[in-house]
Image (cartoon, grey):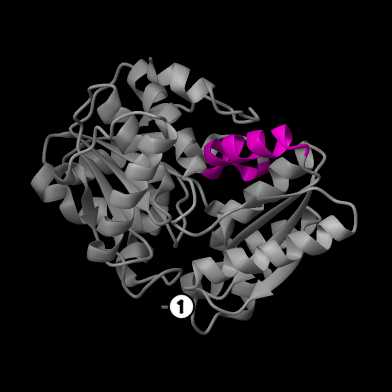
Amino acid sequence: MTLETRLSQHPRARMGHLPTLLEPMTNLGRQLGLDLWVKRDDCTGIGMGGNKVRQLEFYLGKAQAQSATQVLITGAVQSNFVRTAAAMAARLGMGCHIQLEERVTEPTALYRENGNVLLDRVLGATLHSYPDGEDETGADANLRTIAKNLQAAGEVPFIVPLAADQPPTGALGYVDAAIELLTQDTRFDEIFIASGSALTHCGLLLGLRALGDETPVTGVCVRRRATAQTTRVGQRLKDLARLLDMPNPVTDADIRLDESALAPGYGRMGPLTRKAVERTARTEGLFLDPVYTGKVMAALIRRAPDLAGKRVLFWHTGGQPALFAYADAFAAD
């Protein structure tokens, strides 16, 4: 059975502007001594785009199959995932309940009110708060409580789970992205991509290996240290192979994590990340965000001397709305 056939067995609500472009980053690449390219998943369309569109097509396909009327989802205060879920749910005529968890210590007023949070409100989502940013299981349990209340009111809720012990449905979107990349007929020596929930990272890596492509995929840590993230990625890959009803083609050696840009922690912008965001904007006119893509680019820039002359792909997963929540950080000298 082909990989495409395995994917076709899962319901999908197609909304993304796909395929996304592959573009050379000529100016920055020249400075770094690389043949640098970008995969423009910031241009997936609905709700200001980003990688979550690919993931949510599969979650919302399941929601449609269950005749859901309300989508429930958890994310950080500046979550791209929940903003995209609210936009895609609106397109499908569904309501959206967003549970915002406290992952970032000492957030500013801008962080709480601007960026993605502003868009959540514009989209008409119902916002809930969850006090613990490291309790994925508890956050899912709280969503189930909200779901019961919605059911009692006659709604049909669908939960997009957060915890790593749940099926990695969203990763199917990046298995499909691996197929898409290989049809674009440009091969790379290494790919850099964010690794947080690990669904994007795992989907791409498993998809490439299942298709016989051995390109190294470096997941840049944005939330956890590399040791913890390696464990998460390994388990998610096993779960994804099970979801696709196929052997896991990924070896332990394939799991590559880089934590060099993680500090000072999730959702907090260190000097390397700020420099990477500004440098990319000032050479390529391309906006990155402080939470995910800025850290990926910071790690890539740090590795550039070891990659001299190679063709490298930076996978842009979007997230630009979060820039507006960090305006004070960019204004600081």
Q: Residue at x 43, y 55 (%)?
A: 197
Q: Residue at x 78, y 56 (%)?
A: 122
Name the quadrant containing residue 208: top left
Q: Which residues are magenta?
A: 47-67
Name the quadrant containing residue 67: top right
Horizontal and vertical percent for residue 179? 39, 22
Dot 1: within a 10 Å radius of its alpha carbon, few (fewer than 14), some, or many (20 or more) residues?
Answer: few
Horizontal and vertical percent for residue 242? 39, 37
Does residue 77 show up? no
Q: Main secondary structure of the magenta part?
A: helix
In this view, the residue in front, 21 or 183, is: 183
Callout 1 amino acid = Ala
Instruction: Give the answer, above or below, for where 183 lies relative to 244.
Output: above
User: Considering the image in quadrants, where does the N terminus appear?
Assistant: top left
Q: Is-magenta flag for residue 299?
A: no
Q: Which residue is mark 1?
A: 332
Q: State the residue lying farthest toward the bottom.
A: 106
Asked whether, in this view, residue 76 is left or right of residue 207, the answer is right
Q: How many marks?
A: 1
Q: Residue at x 64, y 56 (%)?
A: 73
Instruction: Give the answer, above or below, for where 154 lies relative to 187.
Output: below
Q: Is-magenta flag for residue 61?
A: yes
Name the secondary structure under disc 1. loop
Does residue 211 show up? yes
In this view, the residue in front, 118 or 256, is: 256
Horizontal and vertical percent for residue 38? 36, 36
User: Considering the image in quadrants, where does the C terminus appear?
Assistant: bottom left
Horizontal and vertical percent for residue 160? 61, 51
Instruction: Give the answer, above or below, for where 300 lies relative to 241.
Output: below
Instruction: Give the answer, above or below, for where 72 lies relative to 50.
Output: below
Asked whether, in this view, residue 318 is left or right of residue 257, the answer is right
